[in-house]
Amino acid sequence: MWASGFARVSGFALAGALVLGSVGMACARQDAEPVTVAKRFAESARRGDVEAMMAVLERPAVARLERAAERASDQVGGRRSIAAAEMLQIVGVDRSISITEATLVDQSEQLAHVDLGTTAGQTIRIELVWEPAEDPAEGEPQEDASEGSWKVRIPLPSLPPTSTSTALATPDA
C-alpha cells in the first residue's frame, strides 16, 4: 500500500518536474524584448502596416512625423488634416522576403542592437532605445525608469548643408 502511494506521489512529482522543466525551457527560448520589438517592426514594414510601425517607434521620431504632418496640413491651406502616419512612407520593401532569424547583438540599459536575418540572405541591424512609460496625466516620461518599453530608432535622413553666406550676400543689382 505504501509503495503504491509512493509511486503515485513520485509519478505526480515527475509529471510536475516535466511540466516545470518544459516551462523553464520555453522561457529560455523566448526572445528578449528588443528582439521581439525589432521583429514586430520588420513584420509591420513587410505588411505595409504604418500604424503598427508607429506603435514601436521612439517618441522623437513620432514627434517629427507629427510636426511634418502639421506643416503639410498648413501647406494645403487647412483643406485637409494630414495624419502623422501619412508622413511615414514604406518604400522598397519586398513583401516576399521575411525574417528568418533575429539576434540580440548588444544591450545596455538605454540602447540595444538587433540583427535581423532575411530569406534573401541579408542582415539588417535595428537600433532600439529604452523609453520610460509616459505619465498619463502630463504626457511626459515617468521618473521611474523601470517601467517602459523598447522602441525602434529610425535614422534621420542626411540634410545637405545650408549656406547662410549666399542668403546674406548683397544682391547683384
Image: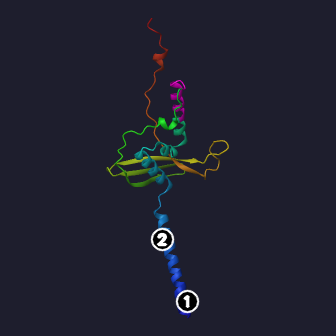
Quadrant of the rendered structure where residue 81 is? top right
At label 2, counting other C-alpha atoms closer than 10 Å, the crowd grade (few under 14, some 14-19, many 20 or more) is: few
Query: Which of 59 and 73 lies nearest the eye of the viewer?
Result: 73
x then y, percent, for residue 108: 52, 51
Query: Which of 102 and 55 lies nearest the eye of the viewer?
Result: 55
At label 1, counting other C-alpha atoms closer than 10 Å, the crowd grade (few under 14, some 14-19, many 20 or more) is: few
Disc 2 residue type (three-letter): Ser
The answer to the question of whether label 1 and label 2 lie on touching residues, with beta carbons closer than 8 A, is no
* Residue positioned 48% across, 71% down in the render: 22
Label the magenta part by its dominant secondary structure: helix
Secondary element under disc 2, as helix, strand or loop, is: helix
Q: How is the image coloured?
A: rainbow
Secondary element under disc 1, as helix, strand or loop, is: helix
Q: Which residues are magenta?
A: 66-78
Give yes or no for residue 73 being in the magenta stretch.
yes
Query: Which of 161 and 55 lies nearest the eye of the viewer?
Result: 55
* Residue positioned 46% across, 47% down in the render: 41
| First-in-chain label (1 vs 2) | 1
Q: In the rendered image, which residue does mark 1 sit on?
A: 5
Mark 1 and mark 2: span between their CA atoms? 26 Å
Disc 1 residue type (three-letter): Gly
The quadrant the N terminus occupies is bottom right
Relative placement, left or right, of 101 versus 53 is: left
Residue most extreme to the bottom: 1
Residue most extreme to the front: 79
Q: In the rendered image, which residue does mark 2 sit on?
A: 22
x then y, percent, for residue 93: 37, 43
* Residue positioned 47% across, 61% down in the render: 30
